[in-house]
Image (cartoon, rainbow, N blue to C red):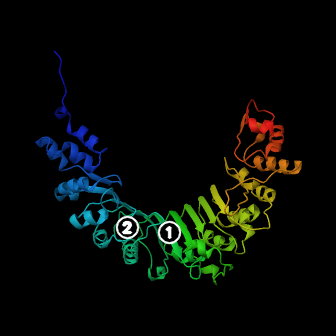
Amino acid sequence: MNSHTHIEDLSNEIFFEIFDYLHALDIFTAFNSLNKRISSILQIIPLRILISYDHCYRQINFLSSYLNFHSHQVISIKIYDTIRDYSSIINLLFNRHYFINLQSCIFFSIKPSTKLENVIKQLKHLNRLVSFSIRQPRQKNLNENDKDDLIRTLFMHKSSFLRSIIFQFPYNYLNISNYNSISSNILSLLLWISGSPSTLSVYSIIPILRLCYTIRYLTIAIEHEDSLENNHINFSIQPPLINENLLPTLSLVKSFYLANLARCDIRSISYILRCMPNLIHFNFNLIIPSAIWPFPHELLNGYVWQQMLEFYIPCLSKFEFHMSIIKRYPKLDLDFVVHSFEYFSQKYPNWNMIIDRWRLYRGNPVNFLETNNNSDAQQSVNCLSHFVHLSNITQIEFLLSFGTSRCQDIQFILQACPNVMDLIISTEYLLS
């Protein structure tokens, strides 16, 4: 005799496991009012809300109707503020419901017109909150008053569970000295610092570090407002007077990621690193759209980096960096830059140095210069050798991307790659 198992025959434990993989909207859409047993299970399970940009208002309104009876079960919220046919979803939900047991809260793309007053009121009393995050795209900003209140509320939060804060929106943090410290339970912090070049520099990070004694994982992005306009202003960095004996010591920081889109020098970075004597992982990202200002070439000197890292952060076991710079003449000596960083390729496993130079022409796409002699062609090979071990290459394809002016390079590249077995060359190169 054949027997059939129906969904109602599953144990409560299996339903708990199933619901753990589903979001609140899916659960209420598929299972609510199915039967009394399922309805009773829905009364006790933890709920996770996910609202993405492709949802519609009808779905949100449907979800909200059930949250009237289940909002106390919500432990996680992940919301895009603008959906297909409605905006300010955050306002809608936090005005209607109180999420007393919320543990994780993530907001994306908050509209400037969205008021976070009710969100901030609820945050003050969320005693189980573990992580809070706002991730804003560059073109969208928050209401300035909400920024102040939000930062103050989270920095001074009394929850013993709070561990992580991500403030991925621009703010100058000039009033940071008004805080004695941030919550002692926070272990991970991400800040996006933005302000005028006249008031903000990389040195502005140091007052923030004075509040981070309990932080273990720190990420800071710093940039100047109106960066495209300000990058055409020629001025040098004026370091403030700093008493090195009064620098904070953040002995718990293990990982530090610094994304720098502002003018900086090696001295400012050294002041920051000496505050983190037990640092294990350091990631440095420098993006300078236009280095008309006096560019500090020591940033591209591996010997300077080696001396600084060994002296101030001797526990470092992982070092990553990326620098993107647009500058005028004189040209950088790429060979010197590469050789100066050889120490790091030996010290850190799988550490590689990649360096490249491009010439940009206003009003035209990036292009290669025409090769007129063998020395120019050989220079192209030298540049390629900074990317890969040419002797290990077994396959090459020469596509006609920039015209036939570089056909002479092919000969020198092939001579430097003796182990090539698979070769493809566009016909135009052979006929040129």
Looking at the image, the residue that sits furthest to the right is 374
Q: What residue did someone put label 1 on? A: 192
**Left or right of 330: which side holds 257?**
left
x 68%, y 73%: residue: 267
Q: Residues within 10 Å of mark 1 (few under 14, many from 20)?
A: some
**Left or right of 213: which side holds 295?**
right
Q: From the top left corner, tell me how far across and down residue 8 is, in percent.
A: 16, 34
Q: Count the labels in the image.
A: 2
Q: Quadrant of residue 235?
A: bottom right
Q: Is residue 250 visible?
A: no
**Left or right of 52: which side holds 340?**
right
Q: Residues within 10 Å of mark 2 (few under 14, many from 20)?
A: some
Q: Quadrant of the N terminus?
A: top left
Q: Quadrant of residue 162?
A: bottom left
**Left or right of 117: which side holds 404?**
right
Hey, what amino acid is under mark 1?
Trp
Q: Is residue 350 visible?
A: yes
Q: Which mark is drawn over residue 111?
A: 2
In this view, 150 is above or below 24: below
